[in-house]
Image: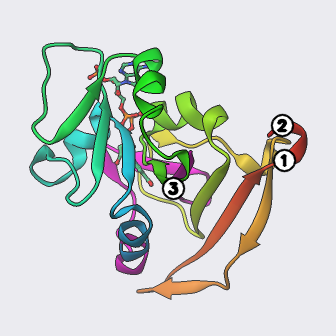
């Protein structure tokens, strides 16, 4: 399983259940990585999407504690155990964890690769954060793009992989 996330220069990822930045090129990359594959998300992240609807052209798996919540077009899982059972039905190379903060933390140890868009400025009033992988010996950088820019916001794409000792 892999994860994909955009972090700011403090590893912040969200504010008021929204993203901190909207970078069209990054959104296209997210779409290219995940389309045709399976995405795993928390209920708050689902609610942050337009119309609170699942993403098109992907199998959407949503973690939610409340068994009475049903989302058309999504597979609902009520616990980590239920999710891990469900994921046995999918090719793990094609499963992407897409947030948010709670679910990244829950599933980080189950991921082998992390596609991180590192934005080189600070988002406004962040309230959700991703763990700092630069301080985590389990992870190392495998690939790093050059610096890109959108409307003055600089960012780069960094691929982290699980260090062999922890794989
Ligand atoms: N920068 C990025 O790349 C990126 C990507 C995605 C999201 N985000 C941001 O992240 C923020 C949302 O993150 P978040 O931490 O608030 O929420 P989240 O991780 O999206 O969802 C948390 C919810 O998922 C359900 N859940 C989590 N673990 C569960 C478990 N073990 N069993 C059952 N249900 C479980 C619970 O739903 P219930 O309590 O409702 O049952 C929980 O409240 C937003 O600001 C969003 O924009 C950023």
* Residue 166: numbered disc: 2
Q: Residue at x 67, y 85 (%)?
A: 146
| Residue 19 lies in the magenta stretch | yes
Element at label 1? loop
Dot 2 and dot 3 residues touching (CB under 8 Å): no
Marks 1 and 3, Cα distance to the nearest angstrom? 18 Å
Marks 2 and 3, Cα distance to the nearest angstrom? 20 Å
Dot 1 and dot 3 residues touching (CB under 8 Å): no
Residue 52 sits in which quadrant?
top left
Residues 52 and 118: in front is 52
Q: Which residue does the numbered mark 1 point to in the structure image? A: 163
Residues 117 and 150: in front is 117
Q: Residue at x 39, y 41 (%)?
A: 40
Magenta residues? 1-27
Element at label 2? helix
Question: Is the residue marked by circle 2 packed among few (<14), some (14-19), or many (20+) residues within 10 Å?
Answer: few
Marks 2 and 1, Cα distance to the nearest angstrom? 5 Å
Element at label 3? strand
Find ligand 1 in the image and state its quadrant. Answer: top left
Dot 2 and dot 1 residues touching (CB under 8 Å): yes
Left or right of residue 120: residue 61: left
Ligand 1: does it lie within 8 Å of the C-beta at label 2?
no
Question: Is the residue marked by circle 1 packed among few (<14), some (14-19), or many (20+) residues within 10 Å?
Answer: some
Ligand 1: does it lie within 8 Å of the C-beta at label 3?
yes
x and y, in percent, of residue 83 in the image:
42, 25
Q: Nearer the viewer, mark 2 or mark 3?
A: 2
In this view, 80 is above or below 103: above
x and y, in percent, of residue 130 in the image:
57, 43
First in sequence, mark 2 or 3: give its number: 3
Task: State the colouring used for the structure image.
Answer: rainbow
Q: Which residue does the numbered mark 3 point to in the structure image? A: 4
x and y, in percent, of residue 20 in the image:
39, 58
């Amino acid at each position: 399983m892999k994860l994909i996330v955009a972090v700011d220069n403090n590893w912040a990822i969200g504010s008021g259940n929204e993203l901190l930045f909207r970078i069209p090129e990054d959104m296209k990359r997210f779409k290219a990585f995940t389309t045709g594959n399976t995405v795993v998300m928390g209920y708050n992240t689902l609610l942050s999407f337009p119309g609170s609807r699942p993403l098109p052209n992907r199998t959407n798996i949503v973690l939610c504690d409340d068994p009475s919540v049903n989302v058309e077009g999504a597979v609902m899982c009520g616990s980590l155990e239920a999710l891990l059972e469900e994921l046995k039905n999918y090719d793990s190379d094609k499963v992407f964890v897409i947030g948010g903060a709670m679910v990244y933390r829950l599933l980080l140890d189950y991921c082998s690769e992390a596609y991180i868009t590192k934005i080189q400025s600070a988002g406004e009033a962040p309230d959700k954060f991703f763990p700092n992988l630069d301080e985590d010996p389990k992870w190392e950088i495998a690939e790093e793009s050059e610096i890109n820019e959108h409307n003055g916001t600089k960012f780069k794409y960094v691929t982290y992989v699980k260090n062999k000792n922890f794989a």
